[in-house]
Amino acid sequence: MTAVTLLAFAGLCLLLSVTPGPDTFLVLRISLQSAVAGLAAALGSAMASLVWAGLVGVGLAAVLEDSAEVFRWLKVAGGLYLLYLGISSLIRARRTTPSATAGHAPRRSYSRMTGFGAGAFSTLLNPKVGLFYLAVVPQFIPHGGNTLDTAMVLGAIESIIGFLYLAAVSIAAAKAMAWLQRPRVSSWLERGSSGIIAALGLGVLASSTSS
């Protein structure tokens, strides 16, 4: 691959990263509670992207393309997971008592491991990430080249770009923490991001039933 080819692929990855999606809202929501956990979620998402790259490299992603039923169930699993994340967060926000929000904003304890796991599962169960690798990555694999090695190199590029973007989202949220931790602001952001995640889950489920 030439440097121009790699730059073109990096540009596509950047466009994919800056387009708001489940991973962005998930990292933002976690970062509102813990900046470290938010960075861990960004890392989990990046590592999961490498898994998708590996699937393309060994040809397993082609199974998803050939089997509409398998792909549909993958979309259902991803939609249910996003719906669970959104609804569970909304329930926690509604259970917060006025006395609890009077002094401090509601906080859920996120560890680095739980943040990493949430980010990884969000990306692993996001069929759009799989479609990106399935449709775009093979176009940049030279004929006769080592498919697995090339796919992993391209996956590493996408993973790094995605991580840097999500890390910037997490850091920006942490820098604005003083303002974001105001009870009313934090509560509305928590509910808003949770609602968006739940809506994305419903959208994935709706598309899976119509496909």
Image (cartoon, grey):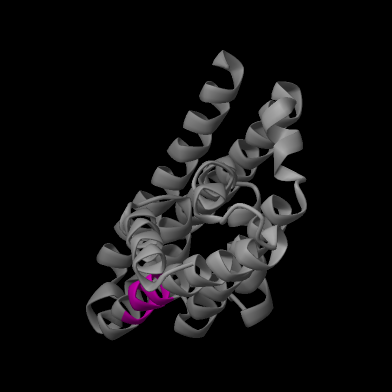
Picture coordinates of residue 34 (x, y %)? 48, 80
Residue 121 in the figure: left or right of residue 170? right
**Is residue 45 depicted above or below 19 in this figure?**
below
Q: Nearer the viewer, residue 80 or 179?
A: 80
Q: Where 43 sits versus 134, above or below?
A: below
Q: Is residue 118 visible?
A: no
Q: Measuring from the top left, give residue 174's x and y in whole percent.
A: 34, 82
7 magenta-colored = no
Query: Of helix, strand and loop, which mostly describes the magenta segment?
Result: helix
- Identify which residue, 94 or 167, lies in the foreground: 167
Q: Is residue 164 left or right of residue 108?
A: left
Which picture quadrant has residue 83? top right
Q: Who's the residue at 46% across and 51% down the image?
A: 22
User: Looking at the image, is 21 positioned above or below residue 182?
Assistant: above
Q: Position of residue 30 (x, y in %)?
A: 48, 69
Q: Residue furthest left?
A: 179
**169, 87: nearer the viewer:** 169
Q: Residue pushed farthest front?
A: 144
In this view of the protein, which residue sits in the foreground, 1 or 128?
1
Where is residue 57 shown, x and y percent of the image?
70, 56
Q: Is residue 135 visible?
A: yes
Q: Is residue 201 above or below residue 13?
A: above
| Residue stretch rendered in magenta on the structure | 164-171
